[in-house]
Image: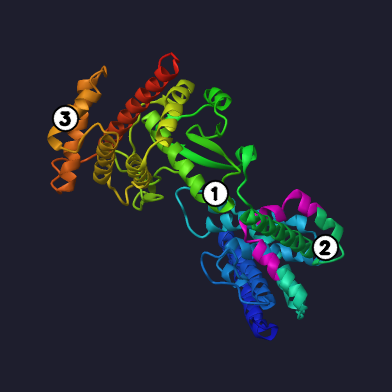
Amino acid sequence: MAKLEEVEPLIRACLQNAERLVQSAKAVMGVPAGSHIAYHLAVLALEEIGKSTLIFQESLDPKPLPRDPESKQRSPMDWLEDHERKLFWAVWLPLFDANPDWRTIPECLEFAKEMHIKRLHSPYFHPDFPDAQQKTTADDASKLIGLAEVRLDMERMKRYRELSDDDKADLQWFFAASSDPQIKTWIYSKASLEKQAEFANERTGWIKWLRGLVQESESAAAELAKKEMERVEPEGDDRYNDKWLFKIRLKSWSHSIRANQLTKWNEAIDKIKLFTTDDRNELIVQFTMPKTIMFQDIWPAGMQQCMIFVTALNIATCGFFWWYVPTFISRFHETITDLETNSGIDLDRMPQLKIQWPHQALKEELLLQHLAIVFGFVARSNDAQREAYSRYFRALAMMAKNDIFFQFEHHLVDEFICSFEMALQAYGDWNGDSSAFDAAVAGLFKEMTEGEQHLGMISEMRTLAASVRIRKIARPITLEDVAKSKIAFDAYILLKASKFVREEMKKTGAGGPV
């Protein structure tokens, strides 16, 4: 823990540098068209003032914070390279000193952000912001220099004092909590900031109240977790009652999704609900699980449910749905500029690393007639069949990671064809003998309208996959080949699922097309 006497020289050094920057900014104001440079220097001066505050905060730390990059907690010293945070403290601290109203925080955060962005456009000419320097007026620079001078005088008159251990602990908790995305949202919520007004005469009263509520919430959550861990698996009808609700967000490269197409699914299916978002290529899937799922089994049970659903969705649609889709499919750069002409140029990889799916919508009949059937069929799979689905699922994951930095279309073709071959054997439609493969597959798809074309596609993709295995690839493999290899698996499982349902319907005497 840094002592106050150890950080005071550092604080003075920050303020001295801020003074030099203010003097430089005032000197530049006399230079024609120098307002943008003066503004830039004034912002740097305010950053130095904000930095002095962060250094003082370091002396309040009652114990060292973890330096693990994965840790949510950060020391104030970790913020010295955060320009907006330094500007925020330079602007907001006087408001707190005069009247500790925490409701001013969002406004000051926004002001700090605007200052930082405007400063970034001040020193250099950028073709994307050609008039940024001209927009920084002498009045803008003069006002900011005045603010920096006032803040500098205020900091020089300030006398630092040691705080009690309790106050240090409360303030350090607040610094750490403000860096936690979940807690931060609640801290600066309207209800929380309105509550702060009740502690107007107590500088740390609001912080103590916040800390107490968070600790109570954490204790309650821990107690609930403890009780759940000790819960005995229920018996009787009660064990089928709903207990857990979780959601996943899927992205699609192949289908657009509209709310009106999900209505009948949600009316017919009880434990899996589908919802749209503002993104037409995004699908929210909500799962409900019963009390029989114990606390320690939520993760594996939930993951298994997701794997089955996502696998079934990809098969039923013959498309692509995953938690994310590749981002860098055509460019690695933000901008490219021709320095001779000062103009930007577009330079993308063509074609993009994206399968050109035909325009498709996720229709209600597809969901009820295909997805529901495939989901039930996949869920009934035995160990050997699950191995084929697991390999298919891994290939989907690889597909989502394929981009300009790491292309593996050839691996994907091999993975999907291997999944297809494994499924054929697992369901007893092929004995594994290569010489018998064509006849086995031809028998399966003989009733397809485009059976010959489909068999030709399977044969071509299987030849490609074989060439990948022996590392003698005859031609470049594309993402279209990947899509064809995936469809070979999808079409087979759709065929098997439909046949299974027809047989079950015959057993029960039910009728109707499937």
Magenta highlight range = 172-194
Q: Amino acid at mark 2?
A: Asn
**Are circles 2 and 3 on residues that touch, CB within 8 Å?**
no
Whichever of callouts 2 and 3 sits on the residue coming sooner in the sequence is: 2
Camera-side residue of 320 and 343: 320
Query: Magenta span has 318?
Result: no
Which three-letter amino acid code belongs to the residue tagged 1?
Ile
Task: Name the residue carrying label 1.
Answer: 298
Dot label at residue 99: 2
- The foreground one among 76 and 180 is 180
Label 1, residues with CA under 10 Å away: few <14, some 14-19, many ≥20: some
Give the number of marks. 3
Residue at position x 25%, y 46% in the image:
411
Which numbered tag is attached to residue 438? 3
Please say whether residue 137 is visible from this viewpoint.
Answer: no
Q: Residues within 10 Å of mark 2 (few under 14, many from 20)?
A: few
Q: Which mark is residue 466?
A: none
Q: Secondary structure at mark 1?
A: helix
Question: Mark 2 against mark 3, which lies toward the viewer?
Answer: 3
Residue under the image location 78 percent in, 78 percent down: 164
SS assignment at label 3:
helix
The residue nearer to you, when weighing 108 against 238, is 238
Residue at disc 2, secondary structure: loop
Q: Earlier in the sequence, mark 2 or mark 1?
A: 2
